[in-house]
Amino acid sequence: MSVTTVDRHITGDTLFPLSLKCENNLENYLVLFVNINDGHCLYDALLKITSEDRLREFHDVESSLSYIHNLRYYTNIFLIISGTSGQECVFQFAQEVQVTTIYVYCMDVDRHRTWGEKTKKIRCVVSDPTNLLTRLHADIKEFSGRWPLCEQSFRQALTAKSEWYHLFLLAICHRPKHIQSSYKEMFAECRAYYENNPGVIRHIDKFAQTYKAENAILEYTRDSFLYRIVNHALRTQDIATIRKFSPFIYDMYSQVSEHYRKFRLAKDGSIRALYRGQYLSTEELAYLVSVVKSRNPIIKLMTFCSMSLDPNVALNFALPIANRIPCLFEIIITHEYYDQEGFTTFGTQAFADISSISVMPEEQEVVFAPMANFRVKYVGDPSIHSDRPWVPIVLEPVLRTTRDFNNHYFNIINCIETETNPTYYTAILDMLQDNITDESNFKQTNWQMWWNNLIEQWGTDKIRQDPILLTFYDCFTDNNYWLRKAITLRKEIYRTEFQRNLSNFSSFAILFKLYKRSQHIPTRCIALYEDYIKPLCTIHSREVIECVYLTGQKYQAIGEWNYALECYEKCLSLDIENEYLFKKRIEEHLKNVRKCLEKPRQTKKRPNATVPKTIVKENLNNYEVHEEQWPIQWTLQHNGSTRIPIDKRLVSLEMYLMKRKDWLYAADIMIVLCIPYQQARYLPKNINQYFALAMTRKEFNDDHKANAINNRALCLWRYEKYVREWMLFHGLEKFLRPFENKSRLLQISILPRLVKLLAQLSLLITVCAAYVRNGQGNLGMDYVRFININSLKIQQLIFFDLNDPNLRSELEEYKETINDDSYDGTDWSHTVASWDNYGRRQSIDD
């Protein structure tokens, strides 16, 4: 096979646009060379693109692997390897977590491409250095850029592991007010991280002397060592690093929350839509589609998440590249969001417009604090068009699903913030860190049982009397390790009380009275028994035997079988004649304890920490997915019937139309018409006046200000989306009109709602078409891609499919039973309650 000779010299004109030295938003990354023998041409070219501290060169595989293993911190590694070495050792490198991508640099491309295609991390097999550097440049910006949202940031949002991590971040962000931050360890870690870079070390030393908590957001937006380490730790959920940098995370969270508090008090409401450019894999996009279709379509972000008011800025982070799907996230903030009282009781939904204090104000950056919840409202058609080379995804910020859940978190945070013992706070973080690690290693969860035990105790004497750390320990009812820690901590507390009041701990009668008052808390009884009561249990008396017997039950309850056996046998030895009639009960307990000792304890089977069963992965199709219809579908399936009766389908259709109308009003109309929060309730009642209002706002709007209506690609996407939905509702209205007299529900609700929805969509279609301007700012209808409605394939509603051959016959045979109280016996209240109640806007209905 002939090998093509390639000129490996690279000109300066080629390298200039690939330079990464001016990029101020990249995380830590390294480019490794392994057995590249090209006369140093490629290495020298990379020196003109990036700094020397980003490059490492190795002449054998063993030393390069050893270097990767000895890296102290997680770093994105981009590996360039020769064809021969790659063929022999690529599997070893592909297994390394820190190796992000691999590039095979060789002369015989055809030969090495045959095996290179089998390894997912290999991005390209090339002989042309220009092609390699172009691909490397794009990958570094993608995988080490400031805005990437890794899989863990949302993929783990519905697992038990994410709940432990969520609580861990809450504890970090709500550090006790009485405990002062210490930045010493944080800066020591920074110096260790950059120990081979004297220039950065000098910068760290200077920064350590000048850093102030009120400058946290400013430092977050810099190309700084602090930003790189913290952002990567949060994104990869590196618990150890997060703890060391917790002072900065606390400062950042506090500053974002304070900005949001002022924003809320001002009742500004000017932020309607935010944008985020993002690359997703096919699997990640399919996962989001499955989330939309689940019973709980909520994703939770665990990092500080950057977005922009300017869609053009966001789209710069989602330019088309090979093997990845560029996506544009649109985060819609409705006026209902601003109206909700107590929405940010403890700041978990806080966000801040930081453009005025950012080192990059042109990005118009808005930052969401960690633990923000978003409902996935819409995932667009994944097919890419020339005028829309990205997939649109719509999110809506939401509260936690239930009010009670929020209240419990508020109680936990209040207890943590008021903790005065630094040792206890550190132990809380240790406990959470250990459970996160256990979830990761063993793929099991003990979260739900622990959480249920915890919420049962709010408002009880136990919560009021004990430190929150003790309560956390005691809630592990099936885990000896944490229960034994609770016992140890209780002993320490008793020792403190012992020093203050010696008499209470020297009399068996007083101790046993205290013991009996604590029977509902096994760890408290065991701590009392082991340190104070046990030495006194030597006499033959009913109280002593009862105390030892009860302690055996406590040991048995927490699974410490040997100690339980010891107590029961001691009872028998103290009461040989069975004077107090304990023998029969004790022998029954002994039988159970010995049985448990003969075989390993069978703990309750724990569910795997995976995606809930309501989320089913599926292949992407060429249809967009709306969230509103899926709660209805789940409710219909819950009723158990394989064939859904027509009356229930009609009720479902009414529910869906109500939901769509409310969302179109709350989101699309407000954004397209640029309606401020303060004017949302004072819109004209005549829908014809909307168009005049929209055009007036467009003319007076600064065309140079980038936003949702001045971006042509966004307007075209909205236009096409509204046309498809108009066709769906028009088809429904046309199909149902002949049956109008057969159903009061059709007459007074469904058909009128369809007419109003069609009017809303007609308005939006017209306005979006008018917004599409040409380069001179004039109306540019030539840019509107008119849709051939005759060939348009409409995606039907899953519960009311017009292509269903039985639907027409069922409507023809339908005889409605009129009920003054309801149209149907089905209890829909739980479904309606699970949706956001946007309310019915009278201005639209009139």
Image (cartoon, rainbow, N blue to C red):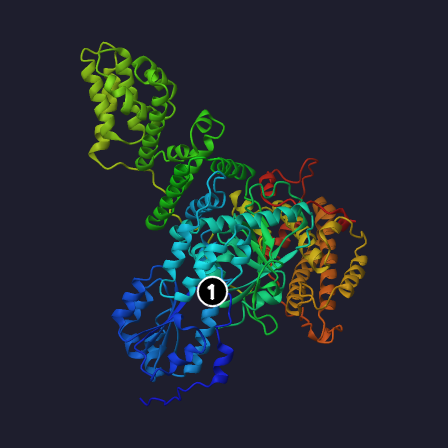
| Left or right, residue 57 beside residue 357 | left
* Quadrant assignment, res 803: bottom right
- Binning the other alpha carbons within 10 Å of mark 1 as few (below 14), some (14 to 19) or many (20 upward) gives some
Q: In this rendered view, identify the residue nearer to me: 586 or 575.
A: 575
Percent across and percent down for residue 691 are: 78, 61
- In this picture, is 248 found above or below 33? above
- In this picture, is 325 found above or below 492? below
Residue 784 seen in the current view:
yes
Which secondary structure lies at badge 1?
helix
* Quadrant assignment, res 770: bottom right
Percent across and percent down for residue 226 are: 46, 58
Residue 803 seen in the current view:
no
Percent across and percent down for residue 834 are: 58, 43
Percent across and percent down for residue 595 are: 22, 30
| Left or right, residue 498 beside residue 844 | left
Quadrant housing the N terminus: bottom left
**Residue type, label 1:** Thr
Task: Report the residue marked by disc 1.
Answer: 282
* Total numbered circles: 1
